[in-house]
Image (cartoon, rainbow, N blue to C red):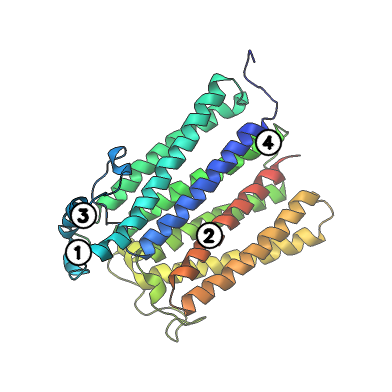
């Protein structure tokens, strides 16, 4: 090939982007499990290259354990932890970081290959470069998050975890969007249609709900107020306010859970309206109608799963399923919005 693809499709590029999106999803899921098992501070150093090799001997494990013993989480939360128990939390964090490294390579190597062979549609080159930069930023933010729990705190700062997850979900959505562009090719776009606007609103709210979910997980807020629909018999929790405005929004267990519930209710109502209108309208494109029904079904399932997880006091299995379904709901919302923009 002598020139970059201009308007043509590239299924090979699309499959690559979708595959990287799957890796990002896996990284998000393992990252969630790492947080829920309190494993995120088990590796106290950031070594992007040499850190890929785990401890290979008893002496190496002893050195890693000694580093963990020097941080507040050990002395205040796990003072009786043994080396064997430490290995259990270490592997969660190590696998999470390994997935990050694999994802980076899975993006960088094919990107350079496709770029050299001029197989990336011209309009997607800078978008893919931006996604690669976002992935690099995500790695830096990951360490910024971990470092917040190494000196004074016994866990990572909730707001930093929220930023870390938010960047991952933006990357996830961006990979899906660009993958669709590569697979189907460039088409006429119109972001003024009601279905495109509605899809964008739902996507934004689902993204916001995921950010609030990160605050719930970071504050272990799923393990309090485990009744529903009330919170300890009240509509509004009495200990909602904890300190100042930001402290309340980011660190109050009652506030983050109440906010998560509230946005969930809003999304549910809007989904009902969106799906109902999609079923009645004669002007909606059939693919958009089908995606609306899928989004509605998955959204309703997510609401039910969220309530079940809360009542069950957030067991690891249900919490992970809740996080997986949240990412899949976001993926469908992004796909619907992309499809609704094409005229």
- Which image quadrant: the N terminus? top right
Which residue is at the far front? 57
Q: Which mark is residue 333?
A: none
Could you tell me if the residues under marks 2 and 3 are in contact, i.e. CB atoms within 8 Å?
no
- Which image quadrant: the C terminus? top right
State which tag comes first along the sequence, 3 or 1.
3
Is 70 drawn above or below residue 335 in the view shown?
below
Q: Quadrant of residue 152?
A: bottom left
Q: Which residue is depicted at the point 59% across and 57% down? A: 329
Q: Is residue 187 left or right of residue 177?
A: right
Q: Is residue 334 left or right of residue 273?
A: left
The residue that mark 3 highlights is 58
Q: Name the element at disc 2.
A: helix
Q: Which mark is residue 74?
A: 1
Which residue is at the far bottom? 233
State which tag comes first along the sequence, 2 or 3.
3
Which residue is at the far top? 2
- How many angstroms separate mark 1 from mark 2 (CA)? 30 Å
* Few, some or many residues within 10 Å of mark 1 (<14, 14–19, 20+): some
Image location (x, y in percent) of residue 299: 62, 64
* Few, some or many residues within 10 Å of mark 3 (<14, 14–19, 20+): few
State which tag comes first along the sequence, 4 or 2.
4
* Few, some or many residues within 10 Å of mark 2 (<14, 14–19, 20+): some
Q: Which residue is depicted at the point 45% across and 67% down? A: 259
- Identify which residue, 24 or 137, lies in the foreground: 24
Image location (x, y in percent) of residue 83: 22, 62
Answer yes or no: is residue 174 visible.
Answer: no
- How many angstroms separate mark 2 from mark 3 (CA)? 35 Å
The residue that mark 2 highlights is 324
The residue that mark 4 highlights is 183
């Amino acid at each position: 090939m002598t020139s970059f693809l201009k308007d043509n499709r590239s299924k090979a590029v699309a499959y690559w982007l979708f595959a990287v999106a799957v890796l990002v999803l896996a990284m998000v899921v393992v990252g969630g499990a790492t947080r829920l098992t309190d494993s995120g501070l088990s590796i106290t150093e950031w070594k992007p290259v040499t850190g890929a090799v785990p401890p290979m001997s008893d002496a190496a494990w002893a050195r890693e354990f000694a580093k963990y013993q020097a941080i507040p989480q050990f002395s205040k939360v796990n003072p009786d932890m043994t080396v064997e128990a430490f290995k259990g939390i270490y592997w969660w964090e190590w696998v999470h970081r390994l997935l990050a490294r694999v994802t980076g390579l899975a993006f960088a190597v094919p990107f350079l290959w496709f770029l050299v062979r001029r197989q990336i549609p011209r309009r997607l080159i800078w978008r893919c470069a931006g996604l690669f930069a976002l992935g690099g930023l995500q790695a830096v933010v990951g360490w910024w998050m971990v470092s917040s729990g190494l000196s004074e705190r016994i866990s990572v700062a909730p707001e930093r975890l929220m930023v870390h997850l938010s960047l991952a979900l933006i990357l996830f959505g961006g990979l899906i969007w660009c993958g669709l562009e590569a697979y189907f090719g460039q088409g006429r776009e119109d972001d003024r249609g009601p279905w495109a606007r509605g899809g964008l609103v739902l996507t934004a709210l689902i993204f916001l709900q995921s950010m609030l979910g990160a605050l719930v997980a970071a504050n272990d807020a799923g393990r309090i107020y485990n009744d529903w629909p009330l919170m300890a018999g009240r509509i509004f929790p009495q200990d909602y306010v904890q300190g100042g405005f930001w402290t309340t929004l980011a660190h109050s267990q009652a506030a983050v859970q109440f906010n998560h519930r509230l946005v969930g209710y809003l999304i549910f109502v809007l989904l009902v309206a969106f799906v109902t209108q999609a079923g009645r309208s004669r002007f909606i494109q059939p693919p958009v109608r089908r995606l609306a029904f899928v989004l509605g079904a998955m959204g309703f399932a997510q609401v039910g799963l969220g309530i079940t997880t809360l009542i069950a006091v957030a067991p690891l299995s249900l919490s992970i399923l809740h996080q997986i379904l949240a990412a899949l709901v976001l993926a469908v919302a992004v796909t619907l919005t992309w499809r609704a923009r094409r005229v």
